[in-house]
Amino acid sequence: MKMLGRVYIAAALVVLTSTVAAEQTGKLPGVRESFTAQNFAARRAALARAIPHSVVVLFGTKSVLDTWEEQRYNPHWHIQNFRQNENLFYLSGFDAPSVAAIFDTDSRVLQFYAPENTPAIVEETKRLQLPAARTLGQFEADLEKAASGRPIYIESRESYAKGPSGAFVVAGTAVGTYPRFLPGGTPGTFREDVIQAALVARYPHAEFRSLLPVIREQRKFLDAEELAAIRKAVSISVAALTAGIGAVKPGVQDIQIGAVMECTMRLNGSQIRAYAPDIQTGPNIAGWYTELFDQYDLANRVMQAGEMTLVDQGAEYNYYQSDLARSIPVSGKFTPEQQVLYRAYQKAWQAGLNEFKPGNPFQKVGEAAAQTMQDQLAQLPAWARPTAMQFVAATRSGAPGHFLSTTLDLHHDMQAPLKPGQVMAYEIHWFIPEKNWRFTIEDDILVTPTGYEVLSQALPRDIEAIEKLMAHPSPIGCSAPADPVAMRR
């Protein structure tokens, strides 16, 4: 048997080193103030019921390779500060870097391992009512003992394991938009791939399974503490988009609107952005965000009178994310033609929204929006009907959005019935390339026992409300919270 050792830990885990931030008096409620140890224990108990008589292995710190892969279409992505692995945080609330964990679903004990048991690590384990952390040097022996005769669940990129040999069935290959010699550019070079290969080699007789299908299903339903965090993330995003939309006017640069939104998010308590500002104007608006990433200044246009722009941005607060967007006229007023099309689009969007009900499949949302647009075809200008028909086809067959929690979860389950506690970013798009127009409304929707709640209801989406917001353009700058005390609640 080969020893994993500290060399493997340093190389394979690709962990970042940092210190746990000290508490700051007067700051907005952070992770430590927002989640209870009892709630994390309840999540672990639910996972234990789903995969009894098993062992779960998790590694901390959101890895550079993970974020690189997820953000491969993001032109503004860069290595960010420490961020915990989402699943490890979801199950423990542990906010310190460079750790590993073993969760025994029989005893329901979550054991952490750290390079050393620093005062910060001791504080974290006590706060979360967890056993004292052990050193990473003890990890290998403990895993071998715990996993004897039981399957090991890990965060594999493959969807399931093949038999007791530990060989995985590959469900897909990694896709990169960067040179294949770079980390993540070739299948097998992601952190999970490296860890998986090392574990399979170290424990050739163990049965390995992917944790992702199980935990993704569990995390689709947000509990009360998660909902509180995501509501705050949404409220911060609403403030940011309101500020950004209010600053749109002819002569303003796209990146200036992005700067207004990001600064507003930070002033309102967002630790990091959920994704980079997506501002598309003029000829860029009819394309996809992915088409802008490889041109240095294509995403830095000066907005012109008569154009439309897409304003799309999301904040992260205490690990939970939001995602909102609006299409608006640069001049502050929709033209008569734009009004006709926008109202038809909004009617279709509303028809889809009405289908957010427990028991309805997610796909029904898109089907309702598509059918409503199809019913309006005869009332649209003849020149607009071809793109409206394209909207109908794309919306009927495509995903009308994605799930939200600690990630912008793009794993769609279109046929599964919606259930209370799920939160989705609902977005459908009507592209009109010949006019350089695009109509997009994206709101964050909570499925309730009786229907839905639009968490981002405060962000204008009607023509009159958008025009009112834009009637008095704001100067380029940041919008601080009107009531800092209220932001703490």
Image: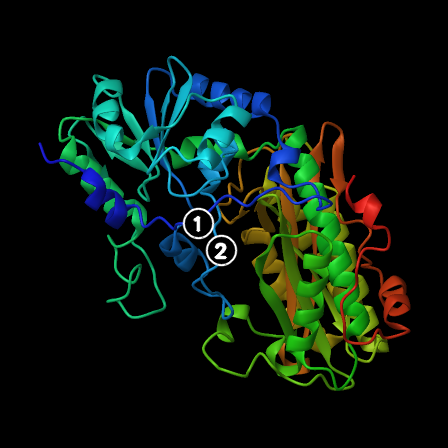
The kind of secondary structure element at disc 1 is loop
Q: Residue at x 70, y 36 (%)?
A: 228
Judge the density around disc 1: few (<14), some (14-19), many (≥20) Cα neighbours within 10 Å.
Answer: few
In the rendered image, the vertical position of residue 191 relative to residue 341, given as above or below = above
Q: Position of residue 389 (x, y in %)?
A: 63, 65
| In-front residue for pair 105/482 | 482
- Answer yes or no: do the residues labelled 1 and 2 have beta carbons within 8 Å? yes
Q: Residue at x 56, y 51 (%)?
A: 399
Q: Position of residue 291 (x, y in %)?
A: 49, 74
| In-front residue for pair 190/440 | 190
| In-front residue for pair 207/436 | 207
Q: Residue 250 occupies which quadrant of the picture?
A: bottom right
Q: Position of residue 116 (x, y in %)?
A: 34, 36
- N-terminal-most mark, 1 or 2: 1
Mark 2: amino acid: Asn
> Does the rendering let one see residue 213?
yes
Mark 1: amino acid: Ser
Residue matched to label 1: 18
> Does the rendering let one see residue 436?
no
Q: Residue 445 occupies which quadrant of the picture?
A: top right
Q: Residue at x 86, y 71 (%)?
A: 470
Judged left or right of residue 430, residue 379 is right
Asked which colour scheme the image uses, the reply is: rainbow
In the rendered image, the vertical position of residue 351 relative to residue 226, given as above or below = below
Q: Position of residue 256 (x, y in %)?
A: 68, 76
* Quadrant showing the C terminus: top right
Residue matched to label 2: 81
Q: Nearer the viewer, mark 1 or mark 2?
A: 1
In the rendered image, the vertical position of residue 155 relative to residue 303, given as above or below = above
Of all residues, the one furthest to the front in this rendering is: 119
Judge the density around disc 2: few (<14), some (14-19), many (≥20) Cα neighbours within 10 Å.
Answer: few
* Quadrant showing the N terminus: top left
